[in-house]
Image: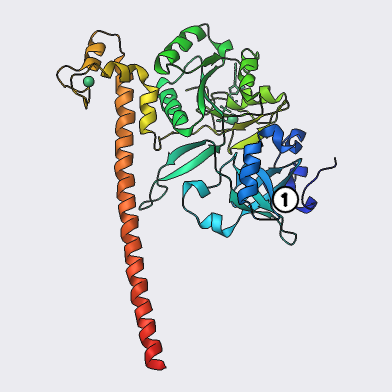
Amino acid sequence: MSVERPKPAASKSPESNPQSSTGRPTDAVPDVSLAPLKTIGWSPALEESFAATAPPGTVPGRVARIDGPSALVLLDGASTRAEQSRALEDAVDLESQLGVGDWVAVEHRARHETDAIVLILPRSSALIRRRGAQREGELAEAQVLAANVDTVFVVAPAPQPNLRRIEREVAQTFASGAQPVVVLTKSDLTEDAAVAARAVAEVSPNVPIHVTSGLTGAGVEQIGAYAAGERTVVFLGASGAGKSTLANRLLGTEVLSTGEVRAGDGKGRHTTTARHLIPLPNGGALIDTPGLRSFALYDATKEVGQTFPDIESIAEGCRFRDCGHVAEPGCAVLAAVEAETLGVSRLEAYRVLGRELDYELRKVDKQTELAAKEEQRRFSRSIHKGAKKRRRLKEGG
Ligand SMILES: Nc1nc2c(ncn2[C@@H]2O[C@H](COP(=O)(O)OP(=O)(O)OP(=O)(O)O)[C@@H](O)[C@H]2O)c(=O)[nH]1
Ligand SMILES: [Mg+2]
Ligand SMILES: [Zn+2]
């Protein structure tokens, strides 16, 4: 296949040899990964942004997968392995944290194993979750799950959808700037898919819901329509929900591995281990993600309201503007629960998500405060050092 890229990089393309036994990550992607960038969403607006900010000599690309220090980047009709530049690696802000789906500027490095990612273009959307501290004393941090996504499929099994998890993922999707769509899978395993869909509709008003089966292919075409027009979709949801199975259906081949669910609790075994962007045969791209054990909200205060429009509108009838809907007199929300027009578990979910965000915001405030103090300390220390140095110079000369 003849591909156009800055320079040939056959030696650094493990993707040309998916079965490589070198121990390097295998980048098994179908040939469509060599598609022109515009088929996966490269637009005139992005072109303009690139032209205005990318260093000369770099080419545009899209991050398909991140493996530790290096990433598989799709170029225009080619792909390469690239590492983040020092500046990007050292940056701590979310905008500089590389995510799958990011549009980047790639610099070819002839004498290196890998090319370099030198710039991340501004994102149209970013799906972010909070990652708890890994070690004691470490701060919880935010993680970019997927970038430049148009639609987020919140995937759950129709036989047993976890409504609380769906609420959470819908809220975070609203916060990301992408559109949420709930996808119920495994409809072939239940007679009650319609009942499940109604239950989901109650916890996610104004969000489209699709009932599908990765086994029979039911509903798959409707899901695929969201990627029409070179758009990007991402699959989110618990392990074993059937994300990769559906993704393979859209791809038309078994690109992604799928796994058994445990007999006891029906949970998955975390078959997918990395996020992966794959171009779709008819244009557009999908991002498959591993089922996360927990999905903590990040910076989604406003969106919790958007996820619970039913409660927000009932709350307009509360006597007090800042009603907490706990025991306040004249609380319309409590009255609705009493009258059974609002489910008590739904109200509980609203409270839980609200509390979680309050807690988060307080913590963020605290972190900002600590960072400001540290900055101040460093600043005065450097002034101090500078003064010492000047004194020394004076004394010496
Ligand atoms: N009967 C039936 N089984 C399905 C369907 N979709 C997925 N499965 C099965 O459910 C199991 C899990 O499917 P996966 O697609 O691997 O699930 P996943 O969401 O990608 O899971 P992780 O990668 O672990 O996050 C596999 O054994 C699939 O064959 C479906 O629509 N019907
Ligand atoms: Mg999977
Ligand atoms: Zn109230």
- Residue 17 visible in the snapshot: no
Position of residue 111 relative to residue 360, above or below, is below
Position of residue 125 relative to residue 108, above or below, is above
Nearest the eye: 213 or 10: 10
Q: Residue at x 50, y 46 (%)?
A: 95
Tell me the quadrant of the picture where the C terminus can be found: bottom left
Q: Quadrant of ligand 1?
A: top right
Q: Residue at x 22, y 22 (%)?
A: 325
Q: Which residue was labeled with disc 1?
A: 22
The local crowd at label 1, few if under 14, some if 14 to 19, many if 20 or more residues have their Cα within 10 Å, is few
Q: Residue at x 74, y 52 (%)?
A: 12
Residue 61 drawn at (x, y percent): 67, 44
Q: Is mark 1 within 8 Å of ligand 2?
A: no
Nearest the eye: 267 or 362: 362
Q: Is residue 114 left or right of residue 294?
A: right
Residue 134 drawn at (x, y percent): 42, 47
Residue 372 drawn at (x, y percent): 33, 57
Residue 217 drawn at (x, y percent): 65, 15
Which of the 4 image quadrants contains residue 396? bottom left
